[in-house]
Image (cartoon, rainbow, N blue to C red):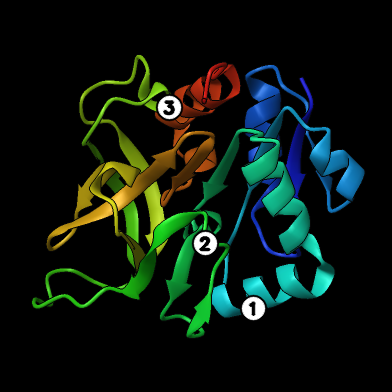
Amino acid sequence: MKTVIIDYGMGNISSIRNMLRYIGYSSKLTAEEDEILSADRLILPGVGNFGKAMENINNSGLKGVLDTAVLEKRIPIMGICLGMQLMLSWSEEGDCEGLGWISGKVRKFELETKEYKIPHMGWDYIKPQCKSDLLTELPDNPRFYFVHSYHAECDIATDSIAVTDYGGDFTSIIGRDNIFGVQFHPEKSHKFGMKLFENFMRISDVS
């Protein structure tokens, strides 16, 4: 299986590659069109600023390549943290458009109590909202490691696979067809993150 991690200059690459290697999968970090379009799995990592990330993607010509890979060839892709947010239509961070694969917006946390700090950082639980192969054999409320100040709001309820309660529910997993995104860092989430990666790598029918 050919797994490509999209190289657009932002992301926690070594931890992702180490986790994939641990569960038996090699991966390649690249921005080459041929490599991306011939992949069996794509991973869109991300740490940093939404506006800067989209600037890198647009200026490098990756936007068209990724649209072809994801929307036309329907290669399964998973976005991680900022990588998930980039899949949506628009973000307050940078006030700019995203990839637009999932209809929705990325907004900064606005919390009414000082009990909840920004960024949302540390271990927290997800609450599945619908059935997804990404969550196969995970417990009802697994926990993952989060670090983020912005969160996704999906326009279509069924695109929100799981939510997390942090002063109110926010979407922590998105998905539709061959497109998946997680707000947390599965590569830092030990056994639950490992299982989620395994599920993504084993998804066979995403039509």
Query: Which residue is rendered at x = 26% and y = 21% of the image?
Result: 139
As shown in the figure, which amino acid type bears the numbered disc 2? Gly
The reply to whether callout 2 and callout 1 are in contact (CB within 8 Å) is no
As shown in the figure, which amino acid type bears the numbered disc 3? Leu
Q: Which residue is mark 1?
A: 52
Q: Is residue 206 left or right of residue 12?
A: left
As shown in the figure, which amino acid type bears the numbered disc 1? Lys
Q: Nearer the viewer, residue 58 or 188?
A: 58
* Of the two numbered discs 3 and 2 in the rendering, the one whose residue sits closer to the viewer: 2
The location of residue 187, given as percent across then percent down, is: 54, 39
Q: Nearer the viewer, residue 12 or 82?
A: 82
Query: Which residue is rendered at x = 68% and y = 64% of the image?
Result: 10
Q: Which residue is mark 2?
A: 100
For mark 1, does the 10 Å Cα neighbourhood hold few (<14), some (14 to 19), or many (20 or more) residues?
Answer: some
Query: Which residue is rendered at x = 42% and y = 41% of the image?
Result: 175
Q: Is residue 143 left or right of residue 97?
A: left
Q: Which residue is mark 3?
A: 134
Cα–Cα span, label 2 and label 1: 16 Å
For residue 56, which quarter of the picture? bottom right
Query: Which residue is rendered at x = 41% and y = 52% of the image?
Result: 183
Classify mark 1: helix, strand or loop: helix
For residue 102, which quarter of the picture? bottom left
Cα–Cα span, label 3 and label 2: 21 Å
For mark 3, does the 10 Å Cα neighbourhood hold few (<14), some (14 to 19), or many (20 or more) residues?
Answer: many
Classify mark 2: helix, strand or loop: loop
Can you say whether 175 is above or below 191 in the image? below
Q: Does the image show residue 183?
A: yes
For mark 2, does the 10 Å Cα neighbourhood hold few (<14), some (14 to 19), or many (20 or more) residues?
Answer: some
Q: Nearer the viewer, residue 192 or 69?
A: 69
Question: Which image quadrant: the N terminus?
Answer: top right
Can you say whether 199 is above or below 82 in the image? above
User: Which disc is residue 3 wearing?
Assistant: none
